[in-house]
């Protein structure tokens, strides 16, 4: 998952709205979002190589405020791309399967976060949504419940001003204000326009690669946006989860 824009506790009846693109190598085998046979309350895609997922929800039939949400992006910098023994997608699936509240879960994984390549993790339940990154220990919001707001997350820290984060977060806020239909969010996530070179971050991969990766929807020969997803958590009904598969 490489781009997530989300509104937390902005709309009275919809505490969370999240729109996201999953970017991955086409060769990495995965299953589309579905109810998991081994954990029927979880709805998510699945990494068929390591068993985790990049974004998912867990419904609660008795209390809608106990529905869970989790998602992850990788942190893009060469020093955080070493070969580690643990799959980042397990951080998402383990939270969805657990009975821990977000604060307890972050406390649990914090001590072993060095075992993973660089990541940004979102975990939420009820009135709490937490962003945690093993690359951002100096960030004031790292590992703490987020206040209400509209946020953007790509392959840097929360709200870092990468061009596609700035552009998509602004479009997302506009769509929320308009009460736009769901299809408008998928149109937003389908933009293939790269950012100007003068605005590109330098993450150590060269300007040609940086430019290709600056698109909201990435389309490279062996790597790109595999799926777009829209998630809504409600106070009074079960979650909404819609996924569009491209590869």
Image (tube, helix red, strand yellow):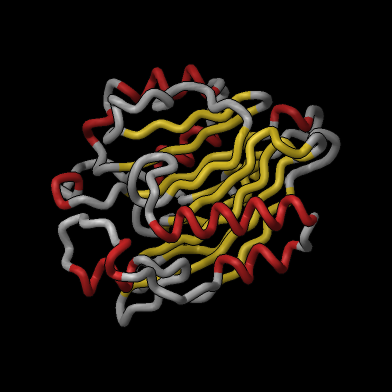
The residue at the point 39 percent across, 27 percent down is 142
Residue name at image x 61 percent, y 49 percent:
18
In this view, which residue lies farthest toward the right?
236
Q: Hey, which quadrant is residue 68 in on the image?
A: top right
Between 244 and 60, the one lying in front of the other is 244
Q: Which residue is drawn at 38% across and 23% down?
A: 140
State whether residue 79 is above or below residue 108.
below
* Quarter of the rendering occupied by the N terminus: bottom left
Left or right relative to 168: residue 140:
left
Q: x and y percent of residue 51 in the render?
A: 41, 50
| Frontmost residue, 224 versus 147 | 147
Which one is in front, 19 or 108? 19
Determine if residue 34 is in view.
Answer: no
Residue 75: give x, y in percent of width and height.
30, 47
Against 222, is 153 above or below? above
Report if residue 11 is visible in the image: yes
The spot of residue 30 in percent (x, y) is 44, 63
Residue 110 in picture, x, y percent from top left: 33, 23
Instruction: Identify the residue at the far front of this view.
Output: 198
Q: Which residue is drawn at 45% across and 76% down?
A: 193
Q: In this view, does 1 lie to the left or right of 112?
A: right
Relative to 108, is 203 on the left or the right? left
The answer to which image quadrant residue 243 occupies is: bottom right
Please give the count of numbered marks on the rendered protein. 0
């Amino acid at each position: 998952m490489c781009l997530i824009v989300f509104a937390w506790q902005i709309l009275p009846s919809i505490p969370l709205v999240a729109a996201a693109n999953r970017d991955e190598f086409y060769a990495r085998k995965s299953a589309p979002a579905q109810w998991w046979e081994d954990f029927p309350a979880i709805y998510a895609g699945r990494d068929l190589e390591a068993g985790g997922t990049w974004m998912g929800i867990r419904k609660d039939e008795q209390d809608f405020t106990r529905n869970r949400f989790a998602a992850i992006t990788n942190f893009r910098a060469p020093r955080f791309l070493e070969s580690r023994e643990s799959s980042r997608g397990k951080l998402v699936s383990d939270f969805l399967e657990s009975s821990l509240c977000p604060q307890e879960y972050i406390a649990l994984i914090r001590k072993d976060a060095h075992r993973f390549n660089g990541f940004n993790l979102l975990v939420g339940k009820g009135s709490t949504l937490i962003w945690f990154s093993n690359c951002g220990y100096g960030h004031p919001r790292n590992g703490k419940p987020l206040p209400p707001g509209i946020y953007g997350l790509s392959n840097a820290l929360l709200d870092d001003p990468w061009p596609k984060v700035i552009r998509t977060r602004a479009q997302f806020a506009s769509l929320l204000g308009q009460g736009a239909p769901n299809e408008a969010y998928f149109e937003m996530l389908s933009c293939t326009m790269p950012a100007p070179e003068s605005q590109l971050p330098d993450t150590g991969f060269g300007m040609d690669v940086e430019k290709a990766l600056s698109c909201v929807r990435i389309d490279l020969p062996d790597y790109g946006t595999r799926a777009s997803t829209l998630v809504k958590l409600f106070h009074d009904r079960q979650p909404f989860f819609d996924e569009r598969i491209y590869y």
